[in-house]
Amino acid sequence: MRDRRWGRGACGPSGIRGRKGVRMSEEWVERDFQRWFKAHGRLPFRGTEPERRVVVVREEVPLARVVDLTAVDEHGTLVLIEVKNERSGRRAIGQLLEYLANIGELRLEDIYEGPRVRVQFQEAYDHALDRFSTSIDAILAAPAFDIEAVFTTRFLNQAFSALSERTGGRRICFHLLQATRAGEQFHLRFDEREPICLRDAPSFVQTPGGRLLVRLGERGGRALCWYAGRKRRDGGFKLAKRSRICEVPLSKKVLPGDPGPVEFAMGHIWVKRGALGESAIELGIIRLTGDACTAMQVRAWVRLRPGKTPELQLRFDELERSGWQRTNDRHPDPIELIWPLASSRKRRAFSHVQGSSAPP
């Protein structure tokens, strides 16, 4: 693709923004990677497969549109590499699919750039290559990937594998290749994160849509989860506008998630001074950073008042100033209090209690 240092709408090194607010890499441009990979010509190990040498036969091959690098390994496997210097997701994978749709019956003569490439093959593999194999590797190289990209590539690999077995056609595999600049070199590794069932997942998980869920408990084949927010495309955290408690099937496919600014603090009891019988059970803390780089704590809890239904709250105010005091006690079974709220559309959402320190 075209060489670019900043994307559309860029505002320079002090505030690098690309397409739709996507944060661009400050460390390298796509042409840097293409030149380096053409000279380096090796793909890292993946799973049990060893490091693989490939020969770049052409850059920006016109397959109806343009794929950044086209390479071939010693077995004749065609390797298509789309390079992005930004956090990438489904859009970039869609580009790879478009290139694959336009390959058709590609011949060696269509990609050879004269006798130089034939000499490279001979020097690299000690034999000439007269035809392609029936395999194609479609690789997206980028500094980082959205969770949607992981789920999409895994689905495509399963679908194409089943199609190849059924029809005996080409084997097509999609891979995510993380590229990190290290001086004049690049460090490469394949993203091999695998979706797992929620029942086997840790406390923090991410859904295919990028939502960060905190597992609170489970029963009857379903998990009680707290939807706290989502990861932004630039790697940061975005607090959910409508944070809520939800029931999720334990069979749902998720990825183990980075907790980010969320701290799990289940069961701590708070009491309000001067309010007889009023208390709150803590679920967790979200630590946010404002524009002035000042840290702020948002506390999630269940507020309990005599004669009233338990209420989910996100507290942006300074609790001690509001008359609340944290005790050393823990509630023995907070899940029993919270679970009935998940079935109520009105009660399962957190209300926001704002204070002078709340974000705009």
Image (cartoon, rainbow, N blue to C red):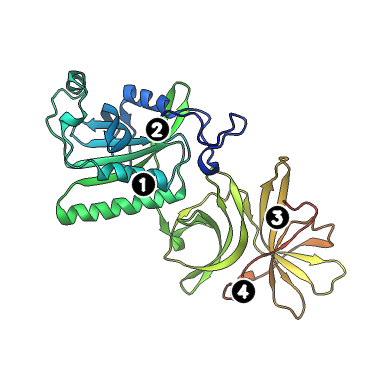
Give the residue displayed 75% in from the left and 53% down from the top. 358
- Mark 3 residue crowding within 10 angstroms, few (<14) / some (14–19) / many (20+): many
Residue marked by disc 1: 94
Point out the tag, 1 or 4, that comes first from the N-terminus: 1
Give the residue displayed 36% in from the left and 46% down from the top. 94
Contact flag, marks 1 and 3 (Cβ < 8 Å): no
Point out the tag, 3 or 2, that comes first from the N-terminus: 2
Give the residue displayed 45% in from the left and 34% down from the top. 85
Residue 341 tag number:
4
- Mark 1 residue crowding within 10 angstroms, few (<14) / some (14–19) / many (20+): few
Counting from the top left corner in percent of width and height, residue 62 is at 28, 33
Residue type beneath disc 3? Val
Residue marked by disc 3: 298
Q: Nearer the viewer, mark 1 or mark 3?
A: 1
Residue 160 tag number:
none
Counting from the top left corner in percent of width and height, residue 349 is at 63, 67
Point out the tag, 1 or 3, that comes first from the N-terminus: 1
Residue marked by disc 2: 188
Dot 2: what SS? Answer: strand
Distance Cα–Cα, label 4 vs label 3: 21 Å
Residue type beneath disc 1? Gly
Q: In the rendered image, is residue 232 in sight?
A: yes
